Image: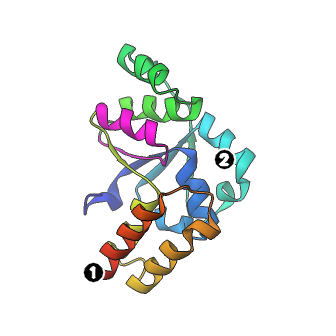
Amino acid sequence: MAETDAATLVICDAGPLIHLDELGCLNLLRDFAEIQVPNAVWQEVLRHRPSALRRRTVPLKRVSCSMEATPELRALTRTFLLDAGELEALILMQEHADAILLTDDSAARLVAQRLDYEVHGTIGVVLRALRMQQRTKRQVLNLLRTLPKRSTLFIEPRLLDWVTEQVKNA
């Protein structure tokens, strides 16, 4: 994520909201200028992790999509079997191409990258916390170590080991 991203608009898919809340660090999002949550994503988080929507330290803005998906986005959505929340998040990205999309869904990430959108996930937010001095190296390493036990985020153990080594050596 860019160094100036504290003033950036973020559009969230459900995964990062759920996983950051499970880790007790949803507040890592609080310095972004605005955090938009599409209606379908809001409903998904409400079903799976309603506490994430009640955090007063993180002002989440529930939004409706005001435009339709482009033909390319509709085709990619069908090809990659994206759900309604991911589609709404990507439609919002059409409106705000300079925003950051937060999603942990690999198919949604591929579509976002194909459309030239900046995209990150839970791990990226945790790593950003070190760079933005929101957490110490020790705190970030602890979050990474406990991630498989404290959250429902699926991450390949080898990838998590690699990320952890990168933080240790930073």
Q: Counting other residues with Cα less than 10 Å from the Cα at mark 2, is it few (<14), some (14-19), or many (20 or more)?
A: many
Q: Residue at x 26, y 60 (%)?
A: 4
User: Mark 2 — residue?
Assistant: 45
Looking at the rendered structure, the secondary structure element under dot 1 is: helix
**Segment tinted magenta in the rendering:** 98-114
Snapshot quadrant of residue 115: top left
Q: Are marks 1 and 2 in contact (CB under 8 Å)?
A: no
Viewed as shown, does residue 148 lie left or right of 133?
Answer: right
Mark nearer the N terminus (1 vs 2):
2
Residue 103 vs residue 33, the one in the foreground: 103
Query: Residue 150: image x %, image y %?
Result: 63, 69
Residue 31 visible, this orientation: no
The label on residue 169 is 1
Viewed as shown, does residue 159 lie left or right of 25?
Answer: left
Q: Which quarter of the rendering shows the C terminus?
A: bottom left
Q: Counting other residues with Cα less than 10 Å from the Cα at mark 1, is it few (<14), some (14-19), or many (20 or more)?
A: few
Residue 51 vs residue 157, the one in the foreground: 157
User: What residue occupies the far front of the structure in this picture?
Assistant: 158
Residue 62 vs residue 25, the one in the foreground: 25
Q: Residue at x 58, y 66 (%)?
A: 148
Q: How is the image coloured?
A: rainbow
Q: Which quarter of the rendering shows the N terminus?
A: bottom left
Badge 2 amino acid: Val
Residue 87 visible, this orientation: yes
Query: Residue 110: image x %, image y %?
Result: 37, 37
The alpha-carbon separation of the residues under discs 1 and 2 comes to 35 Å
Asked if 145 appears above or below 81 in the picture, the reply is below
Query: Residue 25: image x %, image y %?
Result: 55, 69
Q: Residue at x 34, y 75 (%)?
A: 165
